[in-house]
Image (spheres, rainbow, N blue to C red):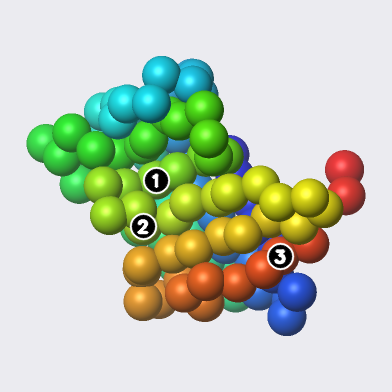
């Protein structure tokens, strides 16, 4: 599960049941989905689409062939971009969650 909280307190993310690797390849995961906690929305995977998740060594969790949601690591911040119009922002700089 990937959860992103932005600097303006928006929360969204995605779930994938496949293992993340650094294979630089797409994986099929019909159980994957994206969500917006702010808007209480869930976007299920489209069955038959071979690009549910992207496993790349140069980025964090990435969902969708366009990339519907991708995370890229910076020094102390994370760049999260989404092309889903209902997920709160298109490209935002988010402070990493403290666990």
Badge 2 element: loop
- Alpha carbon distance from label 2 to label 3: 17 Å
Q: Is residue 45 left or right of residue 70?
A: left
Residue at horizontal 57%, vertical 60%?
Answer: 80
The spot of residue 10 in percent (x, y) is 66, 74
The spot of residue 1 in percent (x, y) is 58, 39
Give the quarter of the image for residue 25.
Answer: top left
Task: Choose the circle earlier in sequence order: 2 or 3.
Answer: 2
Q: Residues within 10 Å of mark 1 (few under 14, many from 20)?
A: many
Task: Choose the circle earlier in sequence order: 2 or 1.
Answer: 1
Looking at the rendering, in which quadrant would you find the C terminus?
Answer: top right
Residue at mark 1: 63
- Alpha carbon distance from label 2 to label 1: 6 Å
Above or below for 19 versus 97: above
Residue sitting nearer the eye, 41 or 80: 80
Q: Is residue 63 left or right of residue 5?
A: left
**Numbered circle sitting on residue 94:** 3
Q: Are marks 2 and 1 in contact (CB under 8 Å)?
A: yes
Badge 1 element: strand
- Alpha carbon distance from label 3 to label 1: 17 Å
Residue at mark 2: 68
């Amino acid at each position: 599960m990937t959860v992103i909280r932005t600097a303006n307190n928006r929360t969204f993310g995605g779930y994938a049941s496949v293992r993340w690797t650094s294979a630089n390849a797409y994986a099929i995961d019909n159980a994957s989905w994206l969500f917006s906690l702010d808007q209480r929305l869930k976007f299920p995977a489209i069955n038959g689409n071979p690009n549910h998740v992207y496993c790349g060594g140069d980025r964090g969790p990435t969902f969708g062939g366009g990339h519907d949601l991708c995370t890229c690591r910076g020094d102390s911040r994370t760049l999260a971009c989404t092309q889903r119009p209902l997920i709160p922002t298109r490209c935002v700089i988010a402070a990493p969650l403290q666990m």
